[in-house]
Amino acid sequence: MQAGLAERASVDFVLTLRRRWADTLYPALGRQYREQLAAVGTMDEQDVRELPAYPWFSWLERGAQKMLWRAVMDALATPPATPSAAAAEAAVDVDPALQLPAWYTDWDIHVQPGGIWSSERAAAVYEQGAKLVMLGENDDYAFHRVFVETALPARDWRRIVDLGCGFGKSAWPLKARFPDAEVVGIDLAAPCLRLAARRASERGLEIRWRQACVTATGLDAGSADLVTSTMLIHEMPVAALEALFVECRRILAPGGTLRFLDFQPTGDFLRDMAMREHGARNNEPYMPGMMAADLPAMAEAAGLCHARWVAFDERGAGRLQALEWPERSEWHFPWAVLEAECPA
């Protein structure tokens, strides 16, 4: 990021605005909802939309997201090319003939202009914006480390495949935690993979990067002991999810493990409604369909077993024992881990 005062102030403003949206505006909306519910006995989505705080909550979610990307784009400096960066990027397995699926390119996911796949600069913007989306609480990628440390069994993995790895933030902790395992990061966005390779090289991590669709990885059957993803499946349509589980079953070795970190409904009407509408406000149109689908059944239909969701607390506890979340007043994503196994 550039050190200019105006650019830094703009980023700080957006970050503070998003924090107040989460820790002040959403609790206010929650109080209004509970008070009205107590008064009338039942409420539907239209009733919620008529609460005084809801238009502000709704508008600020999308408005602040747009402001975020503009602030990052204005503040981001283009990094100089270096021999070490070129060497790292050369190791990325890019498929020049790969046709990106329409469900991936038709939307500017997260409202990032042009999407994350369109250019090297887009990948760098995504890297910085991903920190702000987490309200500045994932600057050192502790969130991903908590997932690796609490949701993944401690075994001597032979090969770990990280699906939808983006610029690498989900793959680096895998290699750091399991240094003897071969870690393979798969993503559709070649610019993100090149950035991932540079960042891994800077960290001294040897990771294999491959451009492919997660529904057709090109990896050998039975070649993976562990397949992971973080924040991937809510960005895929249901038909693609069905193909994803079939591919996971194909590449997993007998006795292999699948762990996906994503979102699930909580049973709290207000929070679940806000999550469904978050999909529209944040240009993530497949999120409602994913959250409504029976993914454990889908995994079982693909030949996996013992499929289930458990809750995840990103504040440090990580994987919980059941699909039940701690009480929290502020806005937060309902993180959950989808677990499944490949029959031995």
Image (cartoon, rainbow, N blue to C red):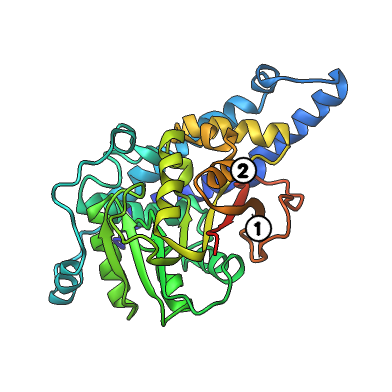
- Is 8 situated above or below 239? below
Residue type, label 1:
Asp
Amino acid under label 2?
A: Gln
Left or right of residue 281, residue 327 in this image: right
Point 18% across, 57% down: residue = 94
Q: Is residue 67 left or right of residue 106?
A: right
Q: Disc number at residue 6?
A: none
The residue under the point 19% across, 69% down is 91
Q: Nearer the viewer, residue 166 or 295?
A: 295
Give 317 or 341, whichever is nearer the viewer: 341
Residue 93 shows up from this direction: yes
Image coordinates for residue 272, horizontal then vertical, percent: 65, 35
- State the separation of the CA atoms marked 1 and 2: 13 Å
The disc placed on residue 313 is: 1
Point out the tag, 1 or 2, that comes first from the N-terminus.
Answer: 2
Q: Nearer the viewer, residue 315 or 230?
A: 230
Quadrant holding the N terminus: bottom left
